[in-house]
Amino acid sequence: MYGTPFIQRLSLIVRLNRYLSMCGISSRRNADELIVSGKVRVNGELVNELGYKIDTEIDKVEIGRKILEIERKRHVLLNKPRFYLTALGKGEGGRKTIDELITDIPERVYPVGRLDYDTEGLLILTNDGELAHKIMHPSYELIKVYHAHVRGEVNKETLEKMKRGAELKDGFARPDYIKVVKYDDKEAVIHIAFHEGRNRLVKRFLSEFGHPVLKLKRISVGPIKLGNLPEERWRNLTMNELRALKKAVGC
């Protein structure tokens, strides 16, 4: 583990739906449904008023018989190795999962998006549902950069075609950025970026031009960079990284 965890300071007076989200119960939208349906009590009284505010240090909030407590937000960067499932718990067919790499994190954190079984690199994990949703949503255009080893030499003509994009089975795709960083007659190394998160997008896109991916590594997500973090290791996001990430997605 690298770095000191950044503990988020919480507002004293907050809307009830936000408080439910802070406690890890649901998103704010789903929290509204819980409130309207009469499932939430504040100090023993049912509350179904949207916009209702509470004092997080004084008021007691319950769903059913469970008293809610604010969940400390944790934001982690993991360098996922190849041949690990982006999953928690036991893997199918005995395959390893990232759960095995984060056993020393006391909070229950969840991966933001996923990396393929044979793809390595930067993976953000958090228990902050609202932030996770915005990181994954394409409307915020958070760019993910990949380091790709591909079969064959990528010539300038092909590179120009790649920059213009290609029609895939699930729609048109065009990289936000693409550059060949190593030329070879048998293999090339490409840096390619997309703000979309479609399934196997990078691999399908490059294969469309006759250059199947041999090895793929994600090296950045928005302002968060993998840097020199060793494989299989994790670290906490720094305060500056978290601020930059939240700014990038409008939090």
Image (cartoon, grey):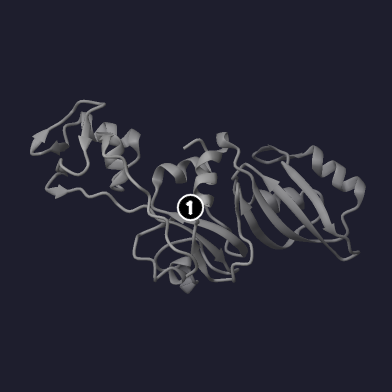
Left or right: where does residue 128 sit relative to residue 225? left
**Residue 158, how many percent across, how many down?**
87, 47
Left or right: where does residue 21 sit relative to residue 68? right
Residue type highlighted by circle 1: Met
SS at mark 1?
A: helix
Q: Measuring 63% from the left and 53% from the top, which residue is drawn there?
A: 220
**Residue 122, how many percent across, how many down?**
58, 59
**Residue 153, how many percent across, how many down?**
88, 59
**Residue 1, how many percent across, how many down?**
47, 70
Q: Residue furthest bottom?
A: 94
Q: Which of the 4 image quadrants contains residue 59?
A: top left
Quickly name the residue at label 1.
Answer: 239
- Tell me the crowding category of disc 1: few under 14, some 14 to 19, or many 20 or more residues within 10 angstroms, Cα based: some
Left or right: where does residue 95 sit relative to residue 127? right
Of residues 194 and 11, the one drawn nearer to the viewer in this rendering = 11
Q: Measuring 81% from the left and 50% from the top, which residue is drawn there?
A: 179
Of residues 121 and 74, the one drawn nearer to the viewer in this rendering = 74
Q: State whether residue 175 is above or below residue 212.
A: above
Count all numbered tags in the image, as a single digit: 1
Q: Measuring 13% from the left and 37% from the top, which residue is drawn there?
A: 41
Q: Which of the 4 image quadrants contains residue 197?
A: top right
